[in-house]
Amino acid sequence: MTAKHPMRPSTLVIMGKTYAVTYHAKSCDVDPDGASSMFGHTDVREKSIRIHDCADPVERFDSLLHEVLHVVSWEMRGVLDLDENHHDLARLAATLADTLIRNGMVTP
Ligand SMILES: [Zn+2]
């Protein structure tokens, strides 16, 4: 799988802004502060998204969509506060990933 594969993009344009996406082999390296292990991390000010480069491409895609929703929530704060309920955001990302994959819109 190359960096240009749609399931593993190196950049994402989200609501007109370009985010750099990097993949990290160790989940502890996803946290820029190295304080905890995580599957994804977004810095909306730096326009960067860090993803755990796990073996399962479906899980990685789920993590990517999860971080996209964090960006959308940030950009639409006050209107659509997905961050208010992180559990709902996580379920929405997982459902979107499943729907896109099962309908052949993206291929692992
Ligand atoms: Zn999250």
Image (cartoon, grey):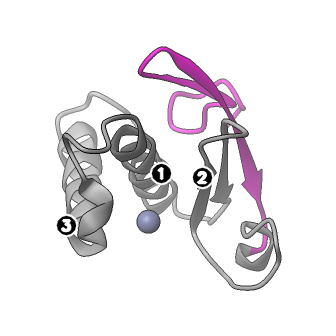
Q: Element at badge 2?
A: strand
Q: What residue type is labelled 2?
A: Thr
Quadrant containing the N terminus in the rendered view: top right
Query: Gap between marks 1 and 2, in whole Å?
Result: 6 Å
- The residue under label 3 is 88
Residue type marked 1: Glu
Horizontal and vertical percent position of residue 21 = 68, 39
Q: Mark 2 points at which residue?
A: 42
For label 1, the SS is helix
Q: Mark 1, residues whose alpha carbon is within 10 Å: few (<14), some, or many (≥20)?
A: many
Q: Is residue 106 magenta?
A: no
Q: Position of residue 75 (x, y in %)?
A: 40, 35
Query: Where's the C terminus, which quadrant?
Result: top left
Q: Name the residue under label 1.
A: 67
Q: Which residues, given as a range, are shown in magenta? A: 1-26
Looking at this view, is 30 or 103 the one in front? 30
On screen, residue 67 versus residue 25, left or right, reads left
Left or right side of 20 for 94: left
Q: Which residue is drawn at 17% across and 44% down?
A: 99
Which of the marked residues, 3 or 1, is nearer the chain's N terminus?
Answer: 1
Do labels 3 and 2 touch, CB within 8 Å? no
Mark 2 crowd level (few <14, some 14–19, many ≥20, 10 Å Cα): many
Say which of 80 and 16 sits in front: 80
Q: Does the residue labelled 3 lie within 8 Å of ligand 1?
A: no
| Mark 1 residue CB less than 8 A from any atom of ligand 1 | yes
Whether the residue carrying mark 2 lies under 8 Å from ligand 1 is answered with yes
The residue type indicated by label 3 comes to: Asp
Q: In this view, does 91 lie above or below 75?
A: below
